[in-house]
Amino acid sequence: MELYFGIIIGLIIATLFFIVVAFFRSGIDKKVDIIEQVLERKEKGYIFEPEDEQDIIRKEKIEENNKLGLDTPFDELR
């Protein structure tokens, strides 16, 4: 008799647990959807900053060395 009582109580507890988890999951999903929508709206605009003169010179030096088939040492990029 105690075995059956334990099984029934265990099933009731498991059912209540899944009901509570399912209830809170829907609320969490709604909040996550709202956050995703806000982030999508903010990603539409982006500011492109112009490259520095040093970066342009470095890229040109790397391209020159690639055309010649040479590796570019770090000393040349400073």
Image: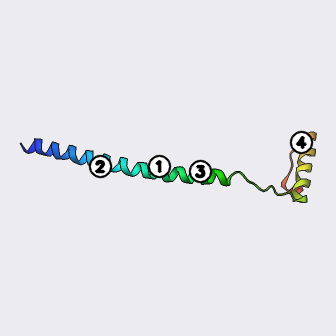
In terms of secondary structure, where does tag 1 sit?
helix
Q: Is residue 7 above or below residue 36?
A: above
In this rendering, position of residue 23 left or right of residue 9: right
Of marks 3 and 1, which one's residue comes earlier in the chain?
A: 1
Of marks 1 and 4, which one's residue comes earlier in the chain?
A: 1
How far apart, in angstroms, are the residues tagged by discs 2 and 1? 18 Å
Residue sitting at 88 percent across and 53 percent down? 58
Q: Which residue is mark 1?
A: 29
Residue 56 badge? none
Q: The N terminus lies in which quarter of the figure?
A: top left
Q: Which residue is mark 4?
A: 66
| Spot occupied by residue 33 in the image (x, y as percentages of width and height) | 53, 49
Q: Which residue is mark 2?
A: 17
Between 61 and 72, the one lying in front of the other is: 61
In terms of secondary structure, where does tag 3 sit?
helix
Please state which of the two labelled residues, at mark 4 or mark 2, is closer to the viewer. Answer: 2
How far apart, in angstroms, are the residues tagged by discs 1 and 4? 51 Å
How far apart, in angstroms, are the residues tagged by discs 2 and 3? 30 Å
Task: Say if mark 3 contacts mark 1, CB within 8 Å.
Answer: no
How crowded is the residue under tag 3: few (<14 C-alpha within 10 Å), some, or many (20+)? few
Amino acid residing under circle 1? Asp
Q: Which residue is mark 3?
A: 37
Amino acid residing under circle 4? Asn
